[in-house]
Image: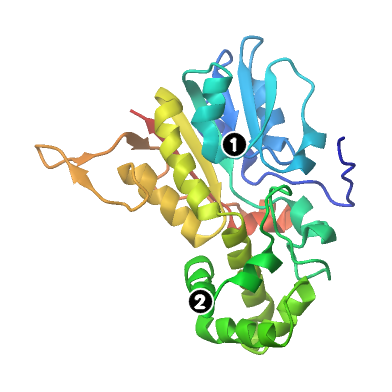
Amino acid sequence: MEKNVSSATPYHIPALLPQALSLLDIKPDGTYIDATFGGGGHSRAILKALGEKGRLFSFDRDLDALVNRIDDERFKFVHGNFRHLTNFLQYYKVDKVDGILADFGVSFHHFDTPERGFSFRHDAALDMRMNQEAPVTAASLLEKVDEKTILGMLRTYADLKKPMLVAKAIMAARESAPITTTQQLAEAVKGSLDPKQEKKELAQVFQALRIAVNHEAEDLMLFLNATLKVLKPGGRLVTLTYHSMEDRMVKNFMKTGNIEGKEEKDFYGNLSTPWKTLTRKPIEADENEIEENPRARSARLRAAELK
């Protein structure tokens, strides 16, 4: 049974949409992937540019996104994780595609729906699962892991000044009682944050936990590697990232063909890479777009073409 998802705010407003579509360079009869369907904004825009023979496969692991799927015979909603891109395309008998668009930002819907547990703005169960069928919530993860794991998570996925203090604060709070709600987590760490940047650092703590719960770094690595297998020569990969870890992984991948950024050179000393980079620097939203959509401020758009 489909869930009824409603909100006073849009499910999601795509950042840098015209620029992303331009870089995707849509062919009317091409086959494309929207790896992060969400509210369907990118998919609808892609479908407008496709002709009758074009096809679009849109992925989302969140059941809530089902309500946004599009009634169009050229469109196929794939309820699954984009890390399994190659498997799903094999299932649908798709060999190669002309372009892939992926927006790695969290939808407005997730932040603005209290019961999803993504935001400290609401007091709710500490959930944070993108896939509501996944077994591990943010609360159950915090209950199981040790201080070293929490510290590693904060150092890798958040840009905190004093991650050690935050990790110790979480452990101290956990000794008194399990941290099961968003407000309990916020209260547990507030004393360890910079008072001048409390909201920013609190958001980073929640971000780090969300990334860990949803295995976002691993998913991104597997997805990027899969694009090499499914794109046609001349096919394009267009991505939108929202924090430094994601952007670094994508930048390295588009430059060298691997997320570590290890450069391999040919016999003549030239960099050997499967990609032709289309964006020397990431494209960012201008002030007009940020005024209309403040969450576009942290968006970084990159694109590359497979050789």
Q: Which residue is mark 2?
A: 151
- In the displayed structure image, the side of residue 253 where residue 299 appears, left or right: right
Tell me, yes or no, if residue 268 can be seen here.
yes
Q: Residue furthest left?
A: 267
Q: Residue at x 69, y 60 (%)?
A: 137
Q: Residue at x 33, y 53 (%)?
A: 260
Real-space Cα distance between discs 1 and 2? 31 Å
Could you tell me residue 115's position as x and y percent?
Answer: 83, 59
* Sequence-wise first label, 1 or 2: 1
Query: The residue under label 1 is which amino acid type?
Result: Ala
Which secondary structure lies at badge 1?
loop
Label 2 crowding class (10 Å Cα cut-off): few <14, some 14-19, many 20+? some
Label 1 crowding class (10 Å Cα cut-off): few <14, some 14-19, many 20+? many
* For discs 1 and 2, the disc positioned in front in the rendered view: 2
Q: Residue at x 71, y 50 (%)?
A: 107
Could you tell me residue 282's position as x and y percent?
Answer: 47, 50
Tell me, yes or no, if residue 24 can be seen here.
no
Q: Residue at x 62, y 18 (%)?
A: 55
Front residue of 230/232: it is: 230
Could you tell me residue 125's position as x and y percent?
Answer: 80, 66
Front residue of 148/117: it is: 148
Quarter of the picture holding the C terminus: top left
Q: Which residue is mark 1?
A: 35
Quarter of the image holding residue 76?
A: top right
Could you tell me residue 229's position as x and y percent?
Answer: 41, 29
Quarter of the image holding residue 44?
A: top right
